[in-house]
Amino acid sequence: MWSLFSVLLAVGLLTIMIAWGKVQPLLAFVVAAMVAALMLGMPLAKIPGAIEKGIGDLLGSLVVVICLGAVFGKLIADSGAARRIAVSLIGTLGPGRMPIAMTVTGFVVGLPLYYNVGFVLMIPLIFSLVYQSGRPAVALGMPLLAGLSIAHGFLPPHPSPTALVAAVHADMGKTLLYGMLVAIPTLIIAGPIFAMTLKNIRAQPAAIFRGEPKPDHELPGTFASFFTALLPVALLGALTLITLLRPELSHALAFYANPMVVMLVSYVVAIYTLGLNRGQSLPQVMGSAQEALREIAPILLIIAGAGGLKQVLTESGVSAQLGTQLASLPVPPLLLGWAVATLIRVCLGSATVAGVTAAGVVGPLAQTSGVDPNLMVLAVGAGSLMFSHVNDSAFWMFKEYFGLSLKDTFRSWTLMETLVGSFGIVFVLLLSLFV
């Protein structure tokens, strides 16, 4: 009982420091980890080493993949490839299928781009289509934003799913394949179907947010844009399928199927197809990489802090104890993982923080219960997207860009995120019946 109280107190302190005190997350995690270690009776001399080991172990396996994902996504954005994908899909499907086009656009663009980057990049496109078509802005934009959110919460190489894969010892390729099976039906429900209920919400977007899009002749070609943006997903998915169908090839393909290698190959291809092949010099292309690494640094620090807290819980023995206790509850382990992430999400706001914090609690649960760790990643990812409200920066971005009241923001954005989290766990549980 004391162990559980200590963990709850540490997580509560973490919540207060980040949500109320606005303490930088890495510092908050370190303080919470020290408090937990002291309450759990760890020897004083071992506490700093445990935190440092946790930070190093988690970052060591993730930092290159996450950084490569950041520079790859930034190049997709800066080159205009993301806009080319959107324009091509909307032009191909036509005005009558605009919700479908926006849904596919959000998901495809969301695969390589982090949520905030994709949001800011796609907002001018949404508003330009609003003024051209006369359609309600919220109903038109929601499917696209749902696609961005789902890719951000469920699918590697986004930071939270990537960190979860490492924390619960899952396989990134399988997680990606299973994530696709969960993400697509969830997106259909939370995107175009839900958007049909939002037609009466009237947005008043500020003119400053409309943006000046690049002329079409300055954008990369359609094939190059789609091929490059989808290359890491295609490579990782194909290599995983091959090893599933032909297990004897898993050793020979281990190097090529490694996420770091896949992301590095994809980025090198992107440098050529979206940069050098369009007349840019290598220093010009590398400029976007430097900016992307500056943007990703805060996320890496969050993941680092979560690794320190996780290691304290592991070395104190409380993780194994909690895992055993949680596994004995008459609730499916995947549902427990989702509930833990949901609680942290509601308290802290950030989906990334919710996911990586929950990993330290549910990681042992995945081992003691025997549940598929890849599905645990998706369950926690679904919980980390639940009920976005006033402590989530994305909530305010959506409200201000679309010029909505708080009531309409809850009615649209918050409900969309809750549908994503709710149907996400439903489809994870259904998938668990077959894998």
Image (cartoon, rainbow, N blue to C red):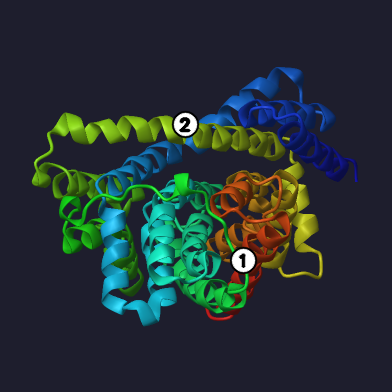
Mark sitting on residue 111: none
Q: Residue farthest to the top?
A: 45
2 and 178: which is toward the camera: 178
Disc 2 vs disc 1: which is toward the camera? 1
Q: Quadrant of residue 430?
A: bottom right
Which residue does the numbered mark 1 point to in the structure image? 416
Across and down, in percent, residue 332 comes to 72, 70
Name which quarter of the figure residue 353 lies in.
Answer: top right
Q: Residue at x 45, y 36 (%)?
A: 296
Q: Residue furthest right?
A: 1
Instruction: Estimate the x, y position of residue 168 in percent, counting from the top left.
Output: 57, 52
Q: Is residue 151 left or right of residue 332?
A: left
Residue for point 22% across, 61% down: 227
> Residue 107 at what x, y percent from top left?
42, 64
Q: Amino acid at mark 2?
A: Ala
Residue at 53% of width from left, 56% of height from top?
153
In the rendered image, the vertical position of residue 161 relative to residue 415, given as above or below = above
Give 291 or 98, whichever is nearer the viewer. 98
- The residue at which mark 2 appears reads as 297
161 or 423, nearer to the observer:
423
Q: Give the secondary structure at mark 2.
A: helix
On screen, residue 317 versus residue 55, left or right, reads: right
Question: On screen, 176 above or below 162?
Answer: below
Element carrying mark 1: helix
Q: Residue at x 57, y 35 (%)?
A: 302
Res 87 seen here: yes
Decide which of tag 2 and tag 1 comes sooner along the chain.
2
Judge whether 426 appears above or below 397 on screen: below
Choose top left, top right, bottom left or bottom right for residue 413: bottom right
Circle 2: is it few (<14), some (14-19), or many (20+) Cα within 10 Å? Answer: few
Between the residue at mark 2 and the residue at mark 1, the CA separation in whole angstroms equals 28 Å
